[in-house]
Amino acid sequence: MLELLNNGPPSSPRLLLTHGAGAPMDSPFMNAIATEVAAAGIEVIRFEFEYMAKRRQDGKRRGPDRAAKLIDCFQGAIDLVGPPGEVVIGGKSMGGRIATMIADEVSVAGVVCLGYPFHPPGKPERLRTAHLGTMTTPTLIVQGTRDRFGTEEEVATYSLSPSVELAWMQDGDHSFKPRKKSGRTVEQNLEAAATAAVGFIRCLG
């Protein structure tokens, strides 16, 4: 049985959010986003993929499961908090990517990706964008402008569906952290990311 972590009042639509490959659903990044979005009156429900839940139980670090197993887990979470038409799904990095892979099939209200892994770092030729060109589900990708998984300059060259919109976090890395010389703080970028997500979800409602 999936364990769910809830923030905010019941709402429709609500945001079903999961983690990236290496950190759990209650990492500082995930906590900050969930708190900010919930403060705007949107319910945020978090869950963990099975491999991460096992790590919480025994402390052993594991790599992510194969995509098919991650997809099955995400679909199970949607079944718990649905109906799909009242749920926006998404996640950090890998979690957001899995959300985009199932969104059209399960007919959710929308998708929010927090740092999309457009390609592995240092391997821009290995794109993970094919399905993003044909998506019909409204999708928001929040991305740091200098994200090693897809910079602003790189993403500008990709063929993305009109259903996909982007919000850029200035000087942000994959977790939206800017350099000191930018004059911005990670707190500012996290707040801006949450604000972008809230605006997107409200437009869906």
Image (cartoon, grey):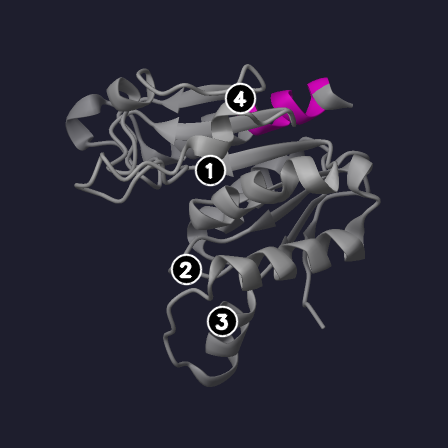
Residue at 63% x, 61% y: name it. Answer: 73
Q: Relative to 172, does residue 48 appear above or below in the rendering?
A: below
Q: Which residue is mark 2?
A: 23
Real-space CA distance between mark 3 and mark 1, rounded to the nearest whole angstrom: 20 Å
Q: How many C-alpha atoms fall within 10 Å of the one at disc 3: few (<14), some, or many (≥20)?
A: some
Q: Residue at x 64, y 60 (%)?
A: 72
Q: What range of the chain is rendered magenta? A: 196-203
- Image location of residue 50, percent across then percent down: 56, 70
Q: Which residue is mark 4?
A: 164
Residue hosting label 1: 114
* Quadrant of residue 80 within the rendered picture: bottom right
What SS does tag 3 mark? helix
Residue 53 screen position, x and y as percent? 54, 72
Image position of 15 with respect to 136: above or below: below
Does residue 66 appear left or right of residue 151 in this picture?
Answer: right
Judge depth for marks 2 and 4 and give the one in front: 4
The residue depicted at 45 percent of the width and 56 percent of the height is 27
